Image (tube, grey):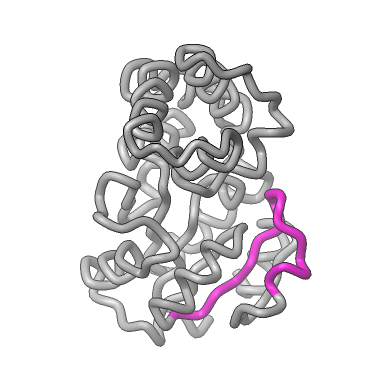
Amino acid sequence: MQYQGVFFDFDYTLGDSTAPITVGYQKGFQAMGWPAPTQEQVRPTIGMTLMDGYTMLTGDQNPDRRQEFYQQFQLAVGEGHQRIMVEGTRLFPGAKELLSALKERGIRVAIVSTKLGQTIQRIFAYQGLEDRIDLILGGKDVRRAKPDPEGLNLAMERLGLTREQVLFCGDTVIDASAAKNAGVDFCGVLNGTTLVAAFAEYPHVHIAPDLVELGRWLEL
């Protein structure tokens, strides 16, 4: 394999936190006087920052209200009640095998996500896979969220990798844009709500229907 590092987004790339994220949105909205959204309404927001997801669903761009929703979400399923998020998240089929194969090959693995890094760490620990990940960068570990390349650039710096050595795998055009902005190769993963056609205008080396096929494409 040509890459020395394979970086991943988390939600809808490696894992599915739809159920606990929906609980967070519903409780956050109710606390702020909004009607509780359905799971199907919440799903397209996954991969965005929580504040952008709030604005997408409500149209409310008030920065104080956006921050209030972030805090209410964290009180519901985040920093205050991470057990709901950790135990309610499942990894997609093939995730364990893919991460294990990368580890065996000596390929560096990083997670670059808008999700809290501490939450992701606890999810992998709960799954018994914490040793498969070399670095986790969550939403609070950077000043600027994807599609800004800050997270990817920081991961490369910390792992001692160049742009030519890295593949970034994600499920949204936000991830594709981040890879383009960082100058790294991108692979789309169709585990989320983004359709394959949406990636057409973004540079990519592959579009994987799932993680099992991604492992085969990487020749692991």
Residue 182 placement (x, y as % from top left): 39, 77
Q: Quadrant of residue 5?
A: bottom left
Q: Nearer the viewer, residue 12 or 200?
A: 200
Residue 64: name its quadrant: top left
Where 106 falls versus 205 (above or below)? above
Residue 191: percent from left, percent from top: 69, 51
The residue positioned 58% from the left and 42% from the top of the image is 56
Query: Relative to 169, does residue 14 appear above or below in the rendering?
Result: above
User: Which residue is nearer to you in this view: 45 or 98?
Assistant: 45
Task: Please report the residue visible at 43 percent of the width from the left and 16 percent of the height from the top.
Answer: 76
The relative height of residue 76 versus residue 139 in the rendered view (above or below) is above
* Position in image of residue 20 (x %, y %): 55, 24
Residue 197: say if magenta: yes
Q: Is residue 75 magenta?
A: no
Which quadrant of the view contains residue 161? bottom left
Which stretch is magenta?
A: 184-199
Q: Nearer the viewer, residue 86 or 109?
A: 86
